[in-house]
Amino acid sequence: MKNTQYWLVKSEPFKYSWEKFNKDGRTFWDGVRNYQARNNLKEMKEGDLVLFYHSNEGKNVVGIAKVVKEFYQDPTTSDPNWVVVDLAPVEALKNPVSLEQIKAEESLKDVSLVRQGRLSVMPLKAEEFDKILEMGS
């Protein structure tokens, strides 16, 4: 049994919202054009769990997704540098967890969401993932 890894991805709701993701039932996570975020995508394994965060408007963690296909060439570009993974929705959080709540929580002070605001794909420790779920339940 492999160890599940935990991640957070950001999407601007007007570009790709949690609601749309749930309607689609599955999507490839495209548009990543940052090397660090891309390297994080390459680390994702099938079955990993991913928090879905609405950036810009809302600024909330709204749901949980899982990785259903590991990285492959981003179909939206011919540049082989960029990759996507496939994600599928698992469940919505009962209560979205805001950036303010995350910033106010001492045990979450090291998450990249707080420290590297521009990063769109980031790893989380299991206990950070669990804490955010607890805050959203």
Image (cartoon, grey):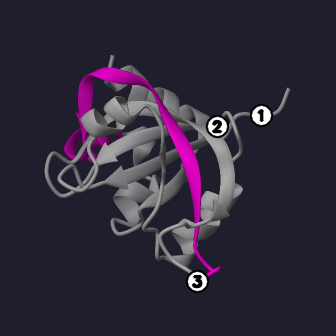
Q: CA distance from mark 2 to mark 1?
A: 9 Å
Residue at left 59%, top 53%? 85
Location of the C terminus (image quadrant): top left
Q: Is residue 78 magenta?
A: no
- Residue at the spot of label 3: 79
Quarter of the rendering containing residue 60 = top left
Location of the N terminus (image quadrant): top right
Instruction: Tell which residue pokes out farthest to the bottom in this image.
Output: 79
Q: What secondary structure is marked by label 1? A: loop
Amino acid under disc 3: Asp
The region drawn magenta spans: 79-105
Residue 22 image offset from top left, x and y in percent: 35, 30
Q: CA distance from mark 2 to mark 3?
A: 26 Å
Q: Is residue 86 magenta?
A: yes
- Residue at the spot of label 1: 3
Relative horizontal placement of residue 57, taking residue 101 as reference (left or right): left
Amino acid under disc 2: Asp
Q: Are marks 1 and 3 in contact (CB under 8 Å)?
A: no
Q: Earlier in the sequence, mark 1 or mark 3?
A: 1
Badge 2: few (under 14), some or many (20 or more) residues near its Cα, within 10 Å?
Answer: many
Q: CA distance from mark 1 to mark 3?
A: 31 Å
Quarter of the rendering containing residue 73 = bottom right
- Residue at the spot of label 2: 48
Residue at left 67%, top 57%? 71
Relative depth, front residue between 121 and 76:
76
Residue at left 28%, top 50%? 16
Amino acid under disc 1: Asn
